[in-house]
């Protein structure tokens, strides 16, 4: 891999990269940074957690003129949390160069944002709805924007942001540099690319030999009613550092977070019906470790990068393969290992096989964790905690009493008693969750192999490709070049991107984040996914 020095970057950026602890570039960075520095439009696809943010962030910051007092770059993200996170990474990368950047997202006080905009940021990182709001209020002007980046472009399309993105891009000068990034690139991304990119380079970086995949994937077949017990046993058995548990609906997330708290776990929920303040709080607590279990809807599936997430648990099977890939990709990031568990009810097994087929990855079946395994896991945790204290030599003040007690009691019994106390009794509260319907299996059988050409995609072993401006498919889980393959899989009808009316007063700011029905239940109001047979490359 190339070191960052080899790209010919400014010293200020090299310093930032070093301070961030990056030693060498990741494959997607190695391929895209030089192209982006040349100003080539590109579609960048690489696995989750492989540094796509810096892949566009570094060349972007290299290019920005710090004397500029108008907005010269725009980064669009599908969710608020992601906008905040990308803005933080941009801020870190640009701080020695003196770049001014600003996140703009719904749910935040617009007056505050207007005030911050007066400081003349050069880079805006935002969600489409709130961006449009500012544009309509004329508090954001795009006349000088030279670079546009769409992070998680496929997701933004899927969420129905196409019209908003179109309206925004119409206001950006045509002579611009546009880049599009995601871990998955369904074929409908072609339409967006054709419309908005100029002769783009497709860069798809998929490892040739996944000898030791970073994410260990397993599933457990069980009935809906068994899920909660299985979850708490799994957490006890695996003792995650940090875990993200995905539930299908907001109601599910609320109930699950509450149930876990009742059982004594430090868990909190994240979904789009929470206020922005609550969302920010939950994320902060999870990032600083004051909670170790985050229960979330798909609002947390894309892009979020929290170091120390060792486990992802799909309490409910995700609706489609892309969602599966992004959800489990919250672990196993930046070269670290992770584990992903998925609960599947008997009626959903076909859907799981479908996910396996599209992702070309066999998910191994594991038995329900037994009570004995759960207890053993908890005991091991306790032992580790004791050894931690021992290693750090912080038990000194207890030594006197320990000697006294050892004179009177058996050492094994004493330690066992201390361990029992530390482990705590399981709070046996009766938990009843409202059952969720199983994910409906697809009407049509779908086979990636028979549905046409598939280039550089997904987790296939094999092709790593960098196109040269041709219009070939960007890989991923695209349904390939066959026009007979419509409706790949069931539409995501119950997803949640957070509350909405991104901006408030603007008429163009519609209810786009699919979560503001306040019922706490699923929201089926999404526009149908477009038939893809018209979108594949010809
Ligand atoms: N060259 C590098 N060396 C070490 N760490 C890196 C490097 N580049 C990025 N990282 C770190 O890797 C982590 C994952 O990066 P990032 O969030 O950009 O991944 P991503 O490819 O966008 O993933 P996703 O598809 O989930 O959005 C971040 O913590 C980032 O700071
Ligand atoms: Mg990302």
Image (cartoon, rainbow, N blue to C red):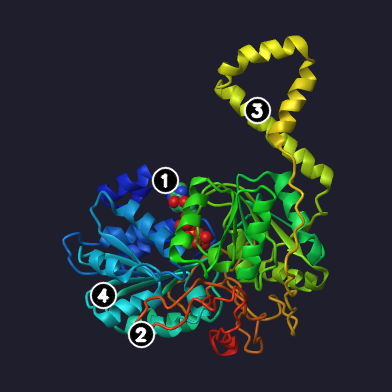
Alpha-carbon span between mark 2 and mark 3:
59 Å
Mark 1 or mark 4, which has the lower sequence index? 1
Q: Which mark's residue is nearer the viewer, 1 or 3?
A: 3
Callout 2–callout 1 Cβ contact below 8 Å = no
Position above or below: 238 against 118: above
From the viewer's perspective, tell me whether residue 117 is left or right of residue 398: left
Percent position (x, y) of residue 184? Answer: 55, 69
Q: Is residue 162 left or right of residue 348?
A: left
Calculate the distance from the C-alpha at mark 1 to the C-alpha at mark 3. Answer: 34 Å
The answer to which quarter of the image holds residue 364 is: bottom right
Q: Which residue is mark 1?
A: 22
Q: CA distance from mark 2 to mark 1?
A: 37 Å
Q: CA distance from mark 2 to mark 4?
A: 14 Å
Nearer the viewer's eye, disc 3 or disc 4? 3
Q: Which residue is mark 2?
A: 167
Left/right placement of residue 169 relative to residue 51 reads left
């Amino acid at each position: 891999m190339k070191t960052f020095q080899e790209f010919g970057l400014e010293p200020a950026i090299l310093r930032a990269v070093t301070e961030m602890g990056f030693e060498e570039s990741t494959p997607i960075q190695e391929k895209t940074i030089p192209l982006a520095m040349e100003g080539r439009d590109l579609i960048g696809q690489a696995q989750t957690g492989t540094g796509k943010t810096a892949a566009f962030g570094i060349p972007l910051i290299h290019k920005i003129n710090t004397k500029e007092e108008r907005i010269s770059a725009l980064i669009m993200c599908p969710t608020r949390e992601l906008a905040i996170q990308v803005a933080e990474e941009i801020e870190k990368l640009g701080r020695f160069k003196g770049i001014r950047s600003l996140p703009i997202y719904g749910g935040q006080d617009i007056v505050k944002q207007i005030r911050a905009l007066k400081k003349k940021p050069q880079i805006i990182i935002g969600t489409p709805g709130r961006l449009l709001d500012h544009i309509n209020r004329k508090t954001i002007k795009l006349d000088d924007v030279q670079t546009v980046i769409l992070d998680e472009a496929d997701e933004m399309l899927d969420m129905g942001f196409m019209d908003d993105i179109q309206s925004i891009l119409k206001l950006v000068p045509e002579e611009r540099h546009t880049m599009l990034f995601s871990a998955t690139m369904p074929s409908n991304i072609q339409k967006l690319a054709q419309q908005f990119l100029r002769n783009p380079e497709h860069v798809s970086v998929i490892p040739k030999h996944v000898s030791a995949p970073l994410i260990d994937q397993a599933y457990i077949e069980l009935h809906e009613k068994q899920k909660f017990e299985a979850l708490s046993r799994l957490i006890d058995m695996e003792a995650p550092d940090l875990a993200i548990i995905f539930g299908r609906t907001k109601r599910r997330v609320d109930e699950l977070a509450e149930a876990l708290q009742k059982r004594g776990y430090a868990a909190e929920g994240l979904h789009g019906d929470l206020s922005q303040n609550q969302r920010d709080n939950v994320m902060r607590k999870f990032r600083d470790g004051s909670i170790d279990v985050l229960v979330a809807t798909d609002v947390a599936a894309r892009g979020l990068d929290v170091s120390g997430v060792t486990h992802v648990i799909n309490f409910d099977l995700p609706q489609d393969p892309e969602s599966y890939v992004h959800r489990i990709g919250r672990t196993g990031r930046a070269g670290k290992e992770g584990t992903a568990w998925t609960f599947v009810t008997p009626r959903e097994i076909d859907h799981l096989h479908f996910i396996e087929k599209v992702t070309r990855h066999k998910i191994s079946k594991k038995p329900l964790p037994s009570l004995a395994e759960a207890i053993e896991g908890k005991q091991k945790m306790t032992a580790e905690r004791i050894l931690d204290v021992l290693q750090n030599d912080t038990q000194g003040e207890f030594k006197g009493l320990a000697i006294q007690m050892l004179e009177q009691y058996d050492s094994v019994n004493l330690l066992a008693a201390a361990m029992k106390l530390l482990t705590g009794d399981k709070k046996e509260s009766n938990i009843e969750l409202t059952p969720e319907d199983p994910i409906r299996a697809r009407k049509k059988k779908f086979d990636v192999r028979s549905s046409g050409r598939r280039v550089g995609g997904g987790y296939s072993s094999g092709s790593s490709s960098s196109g040269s401006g041709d219009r070939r498919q960007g890989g991923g889980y695209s349904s390939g070049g066959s026009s007979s393959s419509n409706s790949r899989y069931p539409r995501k009808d119950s997803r949640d991107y957070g509350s909405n009316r991104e901006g408030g007063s603007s008429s163009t700011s519609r209810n786009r984040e699919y979560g503001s029905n306040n019922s706490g239940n699923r929201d089926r109001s999404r526009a149908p996914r477009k038939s893809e047979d018209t979108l594949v490359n010809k």
